Amino acid sequence: MSNFELKASGGLASGRFWSSRLYVTGDVSEASAAGAAHTGWTDAWADITAYLPTLSTLTLTSATTLDDTWHYATRTSTGEDLAGTSGEDSMPINTTALITWRSNTINRHGRGRSKLPAAAINGVASAADTGLILPAFKAGIISAGEAILSAINDAGLTAVILNRLALTTTTITAADCSGLFKQAKKRQDKVPSAFTL
C-alpha cells in the first residue's frame, strides 16, 4: 500500500498562484495516481469553469509518493492548460471557495478541505444572499468534488484525511460545500499595495 499527495495548481489575477492537495492511499503506481489527479481535476474544472475568471487557471496536476512518515519521496507531474471561462472580473485573490471532504467520523479529524482558485464575481449570490456562493456555483463545487473522488476510486485509490499528529487516516466518503467564501491569506502575500496620497 502506498501513500500519495495529489496536487493541482495554477495561476490567479495579479500574477499570483493557487494550489490544492488531497491525500490518497492505494496499491497502485505513482503514474496511476498522477493519472487520477489529471482526470479528476480536468473533470472537476468542467463543473466550475463558468464561475472562474479567465485569469484563474489550472496549469499542473501531480502525484507525489509519500514515505511512511508522509514526507515527500518522488513526484510525477502533468502539465495542464485550462482557464476559467467567466467573462466577469475576478474576486479578490485571497478569497476562495472550498470543497469540504466528509467522512463517517463526526469531529475535526473527520473532515478536510481543498481550496479552489479565486472565483469570478458571477459566482457570488445576489439579493438577500449577497456575499454567499451562488447556489449554482455551490452545486458545481460539490459536483467537482464528486468528480475528483470518482477518478480516485476508478484508479483503485482511496481518498483520506490525514491526522498529522497521529499519522492516521480517515476515509473520505463525500464532497460538500458550505456556501461560504473563505480566506486564503498567503495568496495575497507580496502583492504590492498602491496607496493614493
Image (cartoon, rainbow, N blue to C red):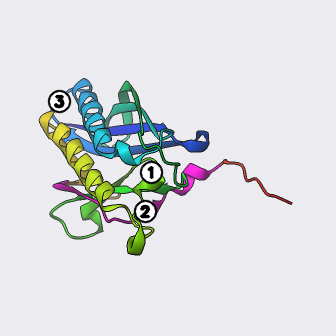
> Which of 75 and 116 lies nearest the eye of the viewer?
116
Mark 2 neighbour density, 10 Å: few (under 14) some (14–19) many (20 or more): some
Q: Position of residue 93 (x, y in %)?
A: 54, 51
Q: Left or right: 12 with respect to 28?
A: right
Picture quarter containing residue 82? Answer: top left
Query: Is 38 in the magenta?
Result: no
Using the image as rendered, state which of residue 138 and residue 189 is in the foreground. Answer: 138
Residue for badge 1: 119
> Cα distance, mark 1 to mark 2?
9 Å
- Are the residues tagged 1 and 2 within 8 Å (C-beta)? yes
Q: Position of residue 103 (x, y in %)?
A: 18, 60
Residue denoted by label 3: 28
Label located before the other in sequence (1 or 2): 1
- Identify the mark nearer the N-term, 3 or 1: 3
Q: Farthest residue to the bottom: give it.
A: 128
Name the foreground residue: 143 vs 126: 126
Residue 9 in percent (x, y) is at 43, 38
Q: Residue at x 40, y 67 (%)?
A: 132
Image position of 135 (left or right of 183): left
Q: Secondary structure at mark 2?
A: loop
Which residues fall within the magenta stretch?
Answer: 172-189
Quadrant hosting residue 185: bottom right
Q: Position of residue 165 (x, y in %)?
A: 35, 58
Callout in the foreground (1, 2) = 1
Question: Residue at coordinates 29% horizontally, 57% vertically from top-left?
Answer: 136
Q: Which residue is mark 2?
A: 181
Figure quadrant of the N terminus: top left
Residue type, label 1: Ala
